[in-house]
Amino acid sequence: MTGSLKLYIFGDETGDFAESLQRLCERRKEVLSHHFLEELNKVLRDEVRRQLRDVFPQSDPRDHSDLRVPIGNCHQLSASSVATSQDTLQLISNALTTVRVAFRIGVKVNGAAQRLSKDGDAAAAQSWTTLIMKAQKEEAIAALAQSSESKGIPKANQAYINADSKDVVSISGPPETNASLLQHSEYLQKFRTVSLDIFAPFHAQHLYRDVDVAEVLQPFSDKDEKRKLFIPVISGAGTQYSPDLDGDTLMADVVRDMLIRPLSFENVMNTVTETTTESPHKDCQIFSKENLHKEKPDYEPLNGSQKIAIVGMAGRFPNSDDLESFWCTLQQELDLHRRVHPYRFDIDAHYDPTGKKLNSSHTQYGCFIERPGLFDPPFFNISPREAYQTDPMGRLALVTAYEALEMSGSVPNRTPSSMLNRIGTFYGQTSDDWRTLNAAEKIDMYYIPGTNRAFATGRINYHFKFTGPSYDIDTACSSSFAAIQLACTSLLTKECDTTLAGGLNVMTSPDLFAGLSCANFLSITRSCKTFGDGADGFCRGDVVGTVVLKRLEDADNDQILAVVLGTATNHSSEAVSITRPHGPAQESLYRKILNQTGVDPVDVSYVEMHGTGTQAGGGTEMKSITNVFALRDQGRRQPDQLIHLGALKSNIGHGEASAGVVSLIKTVIMMQKSAITAHVGIKTTMNKRSLMT
């Protein structure tokens, strides 16, 4: 007979399965994996809502020459899903129902564990199951009975045999019962013991009844469609189910096996031996979970990669007109705060350290672009008159866009990703200094196109003849990162093939200085002292930055500066005020992006922090970072796996709408240079709130 006998072993899952989940998340770019994970999220959210509320047409099978036999040890649910699936699409549907059933089993056994353990909720972290190596089943049963009788342990709290093999017995029971048993039983003390990561009672015929099985199987009773068994499956008790059995009966038996019937690995092996002996196939292949994880798809996923390539960038920064001089600023550990220059505005007329004077600032300092008005109007086909009325942010947006495109090597209409109708612009901006003060002194015909925010990005599109979308976005300090996220989304949804994204901030008005001073945002002692004991607010800073983005698969022969694996945004709606940070919201965002991209927090070695330089903000952000990335309570990050922290604001001030893009540019340059720059915000000692984390 052609073909072979294939045994698929769904083995024990008593260990840490985080790595398996990690691998699954890494494969989410495959169409079916992505669909499964999205639907799985819905199923689990629905079950959490339902279960924890009280706690707080079939077609004929194809003719396969190979005989496939799933073997379910502790993983019988997975085996049954495979056995009742004719194709991959049906497997996803069955798997989602199986996850729902697994969740319900978890809720039920967790409830039993809490009822039976003296420690209640604390028992969730204590093992319920111990392997007794070389022990014999009948002798172990006698030892358990003697111990329970001598101590007067109630039936429900007694230790019991939940699994056995030829020379190993598995004992399960409440943690305190097991501890006493292992300490006082003369018989069990003869053998080596191994605790398993099982934290609730399974395979316990004295604890569960058929009514419990029925409750768990509620999702199946809600389905009108009956499932069919397509291939034989061997249960953890050693029973072989043939395709004559319907899928729903199989699932009921599987749940009964998990809750009530003890496992028998010897029976499993006997059934496997009998199956292989009687099979007409000449060879037998065995597949375990590890084999399956190592398989790689031999096709390109239809939806492509979710990765975004940065292929160009440029900017204007305090004391720096290009990327190299910006890097020198970081290398030299400079703090670039200085007194407001008279060509910006008369700081003497608007400064009052007492805060009593109306519309005054309690600081005289900021971090400024050296020559924000340096612009060549004819080069961009703009008249001097129009250029004068145009906000300096808009002018520098045009300049940095040109420089970033030049770095990327972009040539219009030469490749699919450089078609002018497929390029869009996305910039963050949160102030209108030029419009409200400077241009308003002499309004003329270019006042609207020169100062209205929409024209800052629109002018880039108009000059380069891009016909893709043009967005000017205001989300306060996160404006440029919000713009970059929208740019990435536009690429991933195939709205654009290339995007320019960034942020704009040039300070020319005293009004925001006064407003931020009144709200106690600004430091009265000059610079940003991020994470320093003297942190008392931030120092404002000029920044205009641009990055050029493409989908990674479209960055053919481009100079790839860095790759963006994912983007996400949330809001600190639970904070004590709309301007205060909220640690749990920050942690939620970090975990969301890690899960979305399939990145292990231990693999993160650098975090560029917001780091505005306030006592509350610094401590909150430091705690959220350590909770998610340090993993000190889990012992996963080893002493040699350092995580480095940095905050650019202590060098060049708070770029406000441009804070995100300039932090991104800094991090990309550090990767290019293979160097992490020193943090200059701690002038004396570290902020006590940060140290306490």
Image (cartoon, rainbow, N blue to C red):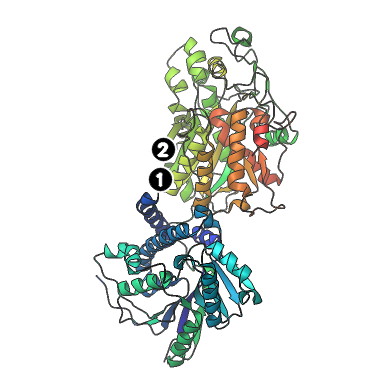
Say which amino acid is labelled 1.
Glu
Question: Residue at horizontal 47%, vertical 28%?
Answer: 578
Q: Please say whether residue 531 is visible from this viewpoint.
A: no
Q: Is residue 8 above or below residue 409?
A: below
Q: Which residue is mark 1?
A: 495
Q: Residues within 10 Å of mark 2 (few under 14, many from 20)?
A: some
Question: Residue at horizontal 58%, vertical 35%?
Answer: 620
Q: Is residue 355 above or below residue 534?
A: above
Q: Quadrant of the C terminus?
A: top right
Residues under numbered marks 1 and 2 in contact, where contact means CB atoms less than 8 Å apart: yes
Q: Quadrant of the N terminus?
A: bottom left
> Left or right of 238: which side holds 690?
right
Question: Residue at horizontal 44%, vertical 13%?
Answer: 444
Secondary structure of the residue carrying tag 2 is loop
> Left or right of 226: which side holds 358?
right
User: Which tag, 1 or 2, sits closer to the chain's start?
Assistant: 2
Q: CA distance from mark 1 to mark 2?
A: 9 Å
Q: Which mark is residue 540?
A: none
Q: Which mark is residue 469?
A: 2
